[in-house]
């Protein structure tokens, strides 16, 4: 059904809704004429036929998927503020990134144009800001070579491995130890608190269905620049493959840790009773709806309702519905232990479904081995 939804979504999307000429008009509407340099770069003229700017269109991968960015270069070789033509990012994130776009103005067309070098890093939205800088650099450097005869210096991309990556690896290792060593199991809440501080407060990194849906759509960020993300995803999936246990939800998830602490405050634990199975089914339905929306629209955050990031950033620019979901989830957490995890979390439903598939596959393989062994014994007896 998901594959069918992806095929249907591809057929429904108009392939000419964003033709190159329309994109150029959207980037520089005051241009009287456009002349292509290449498929993704062009010259813009005024009514007298004089060049008023060079234009480029490039795509790069942000947090929510591909981002299409328009680049404008003045005739003197200086950049203007880039234009975001299309994106799949959370609106609140774009609100935080947009003020930094003014930093591109007056940069030379052959500048490095690299996040952290001549472009400011926007805390909490690094992947989104990097997508903009990567797209602008690609277009600007192409124009620098063809129109200005320059040879721009290319940024050297190195593996990013430091204290953040080491901390996440140690956190997952500690969760594995706590789940398998009897003496350490009583410290589960301590491990969850470490998850709150490391993943939530420090890194603002919580597992989201957006991570999985991005990979399902074929959006794989540059490993050298996003090693932390790959370590994080591997840390959530490998324990399921190795031990058939969803350790992320039980020992690491910072939002789960917050709920556990709220539950400790009141000491109340109202049982869901027979309704629990229906809440678990609701969670699976929400996961299915999320993935169907992703496949139909090719947007990883097409059906996004997870309040994890908001819980730690408290960004006032975030959509109202996420604030409502956050306060409702935390309020219910006082009286129902891990209510969000049981009834609503699509990322948890994804991990549990993956765990069931792995378990069924192993049991099926074991059953086949037993059957083969029984047949061999029968033949020997005969």
Image (tube, grey):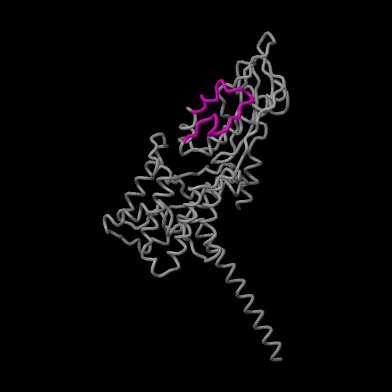
Residue at position x 59%, y 22% in the image: 79
Q: Is residue 17 visible?
A: no
Q: Nearer the viewer, residue 219 or 276?
A: 219
- Identify the magenta region: 100-122
Furthest residue to the left? 266
Does residue 40 sit above or below 295 in this rendering?
above
Give the dominant element type of the magenta stretch: helix, strand or loop. loop
Query: Which percent across, then down, holds residue 22?
Result: 65, 25
Q: Nearer the viewer, residue 168 or 382?
A: 168
Residue at position x 57%, y 71% in the image: 363
Instruction: Please give left or right for residue 211 compared with residue 277 in the image.
Output: right
Q: Is residue 122 visible?
A: yes
- Quarter of the image for the C terminus: give it: bottom right
Query: Which percent across, then down, holds residue 168?
Result: 48, 52
Give yes or no for residue 153 being in the magenta stretch. no
Q: Quadrant of residue 38?
A: top right
Query: Which percent across, then down, holds residue 164?
Result: 48, 48
């Amino acid at each position: 059904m998901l594959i069918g939804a992806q095929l249907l979504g591809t057929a429904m999307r108009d392939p000419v809704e964003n033709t190159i000429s329309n994109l150029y008009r959207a980037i520089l509407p005051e241009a009287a004429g456009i002349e292509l340099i290449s498929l993704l770069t062009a010259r813009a003229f005024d009514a007298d036929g004089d060049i008023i700017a060079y234009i480029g269109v490039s795509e790069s991968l942000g947090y929510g998927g591909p981002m299409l960015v328009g680049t404008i270069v003045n005739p003197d070789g200086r950049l203007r503020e880039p234009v975001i033509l299309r994106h799949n990012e959370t609106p609140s994130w774009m609100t935080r990134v947009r003020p930094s776009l003014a930093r591109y103005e007056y940069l030379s067309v052959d500048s490095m144009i690299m996040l952290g070098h001549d472009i400011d890093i926007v805390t909490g939205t690094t992947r989104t800001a990097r997508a903009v800088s990567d797209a602008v650099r690609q277009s600007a450097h192409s124009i620098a070579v063809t129109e200005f005869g320059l040879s721009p210096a290319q940024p050297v991309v190195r593996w990013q491995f430091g204290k953040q990556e080491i901390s996440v690896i140690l956190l997952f290792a500690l969760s594995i130890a706590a789940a398998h060593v009897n003496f350490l199991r009583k410290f589960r809440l301590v491990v969850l608190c470490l998850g709150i501080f490391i993943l939530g407060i420090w890194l603002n990194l919580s597992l989201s269905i957006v991570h999985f849906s991005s990979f399902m759509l074929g959006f794989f960020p540059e490993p050298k620049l996003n090693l932390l993300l790959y370590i994080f995803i591997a840390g959530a999936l490998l324990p399921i493959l190795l031990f058939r246990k969803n350790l992320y939800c039980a020992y690491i998830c910072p939002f789960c840790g917050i709920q556990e602490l709220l539950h400790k405050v009141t000491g109340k634990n109202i049982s869901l009773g027979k309704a629990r199975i229906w809440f678990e089914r609701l969670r699976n339905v929400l996961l299915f709806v999320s993935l169907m929306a992703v496949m139909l629209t090719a947007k990883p955050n097409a059906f996004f309702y997870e309040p994890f990031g908001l819980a730690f950033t408290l960004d006032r620019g975030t959509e109202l519905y996420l604030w409502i979901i956050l306060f409702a989830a935390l309020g219910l957490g006082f009286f129902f232990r891990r209510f969000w995890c049981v009834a609503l979390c699509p990322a948890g439903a994804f991990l549990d479904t993956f765990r069931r598939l792995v378990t069924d596959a192993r049991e099926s393989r074991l059953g086949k081995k037993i059957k083969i062994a029984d047949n061999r014994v029968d033949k020997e007896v005969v």
